[in-house]
Image (cartoon, helix red, strand yellow):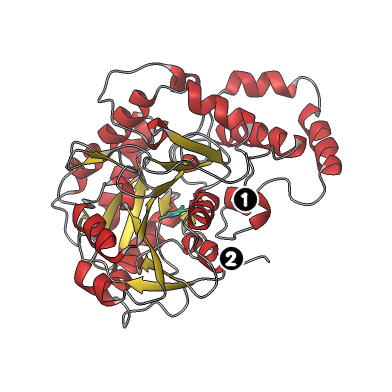
Amino acid sequence: MFVSAHGRGLYWAMSHETPFPYRLPLASVLSLNAFLPAAGPALPSLLDLPQRRLVTSGRIAIAMALRAMGVGPGHEVLAPAYHSRSMIPPILWLGAAPVFFRVRPDTSVDLDDLAGRIGPATRAVMVTHYFGIPQDLRALRALCDRHGLQLLEDCAHCLFGAQGGQPVGASGDYAAGSLMKFLPLYEGGCLVSARHALAGPTPRGGGAGFEAKAALAVLEASFASGRLPWLRALLRLPLGLKDRIWNRVKRADAPALAPPSSDSSYDFDPAWIDVRAARFSRMLTALLPRTRVVARRRAHYLHYQQHLSGLPGCRPLYPALPDGACPWVFPLLVDDPEPMFARLAAAGVPMTRFGDTLWDGVDASVCPTSAHLSRHVLSFPCHDALRPDELAWIVKQVAGSLA
Ligand SMILES: *Cc1c(COP(=O)(O)O)cnc(C)c1O
């Protein structure tokens, strides 16, 4: 079975008008600086939890978590009405049905609404920590315990952090993370648990073609953003080396070299269940200093907050950045988003519109807040690889687009 969905809400430069001779990186890209240690808060990470499996994407980790919970045909899984479309196919893959609960304007769970949707078929609850801001899950955990439900923390936006003394991922029975959203990787997710041993088959390798692609794609993304120019020049010397490797690996592994999650798609391909993250991704995950990632993401987020707060027609989605948070992006709530989006896209500003296409049938009648947020939040990158001149230029474009 192949469950399909389209358009991942990611927007890159569509213009050659930027002052940069390359595409501004929407997500982190590799540079030598990424290996430099940095002082900063050492936030807890999903990657520190005792039970951990590195797989190829967050959605695969969600599917494996639901499978571990015993979710199957006839069951219902409660999922937030404000979501990524990639969260839902794993539920369908197991034969279960999603039931959507409301979120509040501050993106917290509407507990009363959620409680009202619990029925005899409900097996599990999926909760999302949006944009890297950890949710306080104490009340939800207690509600799940009262009803005998399992809790899955969707930490795709929240690889690091803590709330109310609890590290992210530790309140849920299981948690799923997306390494690609935080590290300069082409693929990678993690399934973790602080409460259960991870059963199921030992993950297998994804094949030689996949391993090669996972490494080459990271270098390509890096080159496309003007990083590692010396390496790019070096690799160009052995004429067409990359193309030759490509042609070899493509022939070797004809079907699917990499999961659809790696190519800006919401698709879910169960062929990648129980497949290990690529060796290159696991190596970078182990080598890259995490304090640098956290410190720089926080600093970039605060830079946006400082320069974009108080402008007319918009406000930061969150009033402040909590101490225990490592942001995924900087979400800005915009009164009239379409003209601003069009102007910024034309200028080449990298943006994300999280949740811009909600699951079929999820509209304002299901949750007015989710319908509103899915249209009115524009998010800007705050990843570690952004340079000061790039960040300053994005801020200037955003402020200018409101004028
Ligand atoms: C991206 C995302 C996922 C899925 O992560 P992938 O690594 O892309 O599979 C799950 N939940 C949320 C909220 C996401 O934004």
Per the image, label 2 sits on a secondary structure element best described as helix
Task: From the viewer's perspective, tell me whether residue 256 is left or right of residue 23.
Answer: right
Give the image location of residue 267, x and y in percent. Answer: 59, 60
Residue type at the position of mark 1:
Ile
Above or below for 16 versus 361: above
Residue in front for this viewpoint, 53 or 129? 53
Q: Residue at image x 35%, y 31%?
A: 389
- Of 218 and 82, nearer the camera is 82
Left or right, 178 with reference to 129: right
Where residue 220 appears, as percent x and y from the top left, is 63, 34
Query: Which residue is at 33% across, 61% downward?
Result: 340
- Residue 357 lies in quadrant: bottom left
Question: Would residue 276 appear left or right of 376 to someone viewing this image?
Answer: right
Where residue 117 appears, as percent x and y from the top left, is 31, 76
Quadrant into which the C terminus falls = bottom left
User: Which residue is tagged 2?
Assistant: 93
Query: In the figure, is residue 48 to the left or right of 63?
Result: left
Q: Position of residue 349 (x, y in %)?
A: 41, 48
* Image quadrant where residue 373 sits: bottom left
Q: Looking at the figure, which quarter contains the N terminus?
A: bottom right
Element on which disc 1 rests: loop
Contact flag, marks 2 and 1 (Cβ < 8 Å): no
Q: Vertically, is 314 above or below 369? A: above
* Number of residue marks: 2
Q: Which residue is mark 1?
A: 273
Gap in Å between the C-alphas at discs 2 and 1? 11 Å
- Examine the rendered structure and indicate whether residue 98 appears above or below residue 200: below
Q: Mark 1, residues whose alpha carbon is within 10 Å: few (<14), some, or many (≥20)?
A: some
Whether residue 60 is visible: yes
Circle 2 residues within 10 Å: few <14, some 14–19, many ≥20: many
Q: Is residue 25 visible?
A: no
Amino acid carrying mark 2 in the image:
Trp
